Image (cartoon, coloured by chain):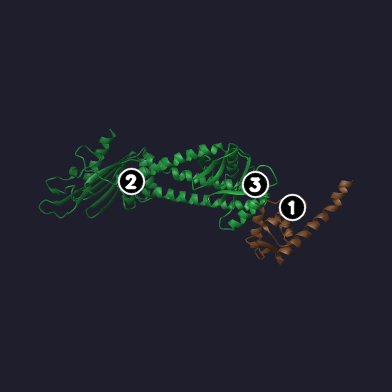
Amino acid sequence: MTEAMYYVLLALCTPLHGYAIMGAIEELSRGRVVMGPGTLYGILSRMEKEKMIALEEADGRRKIYKLTSAGREALRQEYLRLKAMVADGKTLVEEGDNG
Amino acid sequence: MAKKKRRIWWFHVDEIEEAETWLGDMAAKGWHLSGSDAIFVHFTQGQPETVRYRCDIFSRKDGFEERIDLYTQTGWEYVASVGSSLHIFRAPATGAVPEIHTDPVEMAPTLNLLLRPYYMLGLSALAMFALCLIPLFIYGNVPLGLLVYADYLFILSLVPAISLMIIAGNGICRVVRKRKMLRRGSSFSHNKPYHYVFSRGWGTLFVLVLGLVLVAANAVNVFRSDHCSPLPQGELPVVRLSDIISHTEYIIIEPDDFELFNGCFTSSSLLVPWQWYSAEFAGQLAGGGSVSRTSLVFSSYRARTTGLADILARMLPSKFELRKSESYPGDLWIYQHGNVHEFILLKDKYVFYVVYNGLEPVEKLIRLVEDKIASLSK
């Protein structure tokens, strides 16, 4: 899973439409991750095909996306993987910094 | 009213960075992209501005409106599309508007759409190439066709097909290379020299037009080479029916009645530059003989080298039915059935292919051919 995919899944913990997802990603990454509309649209259509996200009721003509259970599970797995990676690096990297 | 102008879109579908740079430079000179059609992009004059142009690749079928809507909300104005999958957007050069693609790895698969036009181009070029080869099949097989038919005009008529194949092959390689670059995490530069694109464009157009003219000329040539002119009265590099039989014995059928038979034509190729075909037809023996149709079909070839003449003699279509003569002290292949005699005689650079239907002994004809070779070799 790429960083971009991870953040899209993270943002969709609350159902949102496309443009709102971009804002949510910027906010929850505290401005570190800025996603372009091309990248976002590509990820959304792929994840929709892979059934990780689904359409909720359309808000006017804008589609609102939400996580499916498969998407939520994929996000959880990725979160655990990243957490394990951080933990694995913690001792060596932080000790390295101190010493 | 604002001035307008149009320019040919010379960029290949994958030359995205070059096209973006060009559109940016045009805007800096005050020419802003305003639309497109099948061949041209249109510009409208305005204030010179520094503008970011981006070309994005996506299919029109797949949520086009929704995607444009998303881009517009982000600050990207949709300007025009070139073809079905290249769409052009613009945004101010500075400010908060993020790039359309912020993740090159995610962008890489979008380039797959660019392969399709190159595959189509490659296939059409192959079909064009195959069409150009059709005249070669008239001679039974392609190697023989190349030997006997392929002249300068024919070789040049292959130019458009070959150049399109090169364009398609190059395009596929470039798309694959760019896709690999994106997958490795490097982004497009959005600032690439593009001036060569225009001279290349005009050059390609020139080659294509020239090639198509040659294809047409080649087609006319095929048509014309089938046309037989009447046999001239003067000296020919072939043996005539009148050399073997006496006019008084036979009724010679007038050309008007059997134009296809009583005629001749010359032809030429790069490898066999000298080719002469003649066909003559005589009718019944005066007083009612048994041979109703005496005919002599005579093809003479002079190849560039003795080696090529040798290959030609061995490739001629009926060759497999002919048997090498044991008694003849040279290269002679013979076939005989009833009154039909067929033979191929090879001597140095000359090949003679003769089909004779008549009562005279074939040895007489062979001697005449030998005399002819001797006179030609002088």
* Labelled disc at residue B222: 2
How many marks overall? Answer: 3
Disc 3 marks which residue?
A: B181
Question: Residue A67's spot in the image, x, y percent?
Answer: 71, 64
* Labelled disc at residue A26: 1
Decide: few, some or many residues near mark 3? Use Cα within 10 Å; few <14, some 14-19, many ≥20: some
Task: Determine whether label 3 and label 2 are within 8 Å by CB.
Answer: no
User: Is B191 in front, or is B327?
Assistant: B191
Mark 2 and mark 1 on one chain: no
Marks 2 and 1, how far apart at CA? 69 Å
Query: Is the N terminus of chain A in the top left, top right, bottom left or bottom right quadrant?
Result: bottom right
Query: Which of the 4 image quarters holds residue A69?
Result: bottom right
Q: Amino acid at mark 3?
A: Met
Residue B307 visible in the current orientation:
no
Decide: few, some or many residues near mark 2? Use Cα within 10 Å; few <14, some 14-19, many ≥20: some
Q: Give the letter of the green chain.
A: B
Marks 1 and 3, how far apart at CA? 27 Å
Task: Locate residue A74 relative to residue B170 in the image: left or right.
Answer: right
Mark 3 and mark 2 on one chain: yes
- Which secondary structure, mark 2? helix
